[in-house]
Amino acid sequence: MYKIAIILYLTCFSVYILFSRQPDYFDGELTKATIHFIRDKLTDNPEPYASYTINKKDYLINASYLFRSFKEGEKIDLIYETAQPNKAAVYSWWGYWFTPGELLFSIGLLIVMLYIAISITKNPTPGAVMEQLNYKPVKKRKYND
């Protein structure tokens, strides 16, 4: 039961990830950007921002991700939609394809669903056990006359 549940989980999570990214992976365009650190007004800490140019217009997006560090002047890949070039994302495995919130939520959902499946099938009623033990498959003809 664990193998089937994990295979089903991985299949559903892979399809979800492939089709839920914003900007869209299939319609998006890739471009290069440069990292610049700008001080945050509230905390006065330097935050990484990606600077890029599309159609001779400059854009700036926040590039900070959990467990991801950048260096000043580092070149990175960005993905954006041509209709909205100001809504871009850093194109990388961590941050674009996988985010901590989605991973934690989906793993938690997998654990809860496995617990529910195990608790349902753990203690069957005596009537259900007897029905399974007395079951004899009915012979069926290969073709109907």
Image: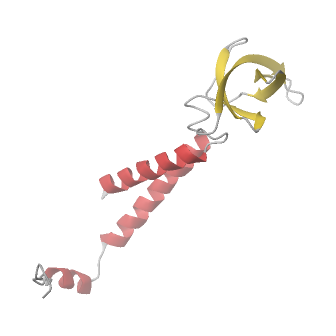
Look at the image and name its color scheme: secondary structure
Please provide percent x and percent y for residue 33: 71, 19
Q: Which residue is more in the foreground, 37 or 117? A: 37
Quadrant where the image shows the C terminus: bottom left
- Classify residue 85 as left or right of residue 116: right
Locate residue 53: give its quadrant: top right
Please provide percent x and percent y for residue 68: 62, 25
72 lies above or below 65: above
Locate residue 44: give its quadrant: top right
Residue at 76% of width from left, 29% of height from top?
Answer: 62
Residue at 85% of width from left, 28% of height from top?
Answer: 43
Residue at 11% of width from left, 78% of height from top?
Answer: 142
Q: Which residue is more in the foreground, 79 or 42? A: 79
Q: Which residue is more in the foreground, 103 or 34? A: 34
Please provide percent x and percent y for residue 117: 38, 66
- Classify residue 100 as left or right of residue 124: right
7 lies above or below 37: below
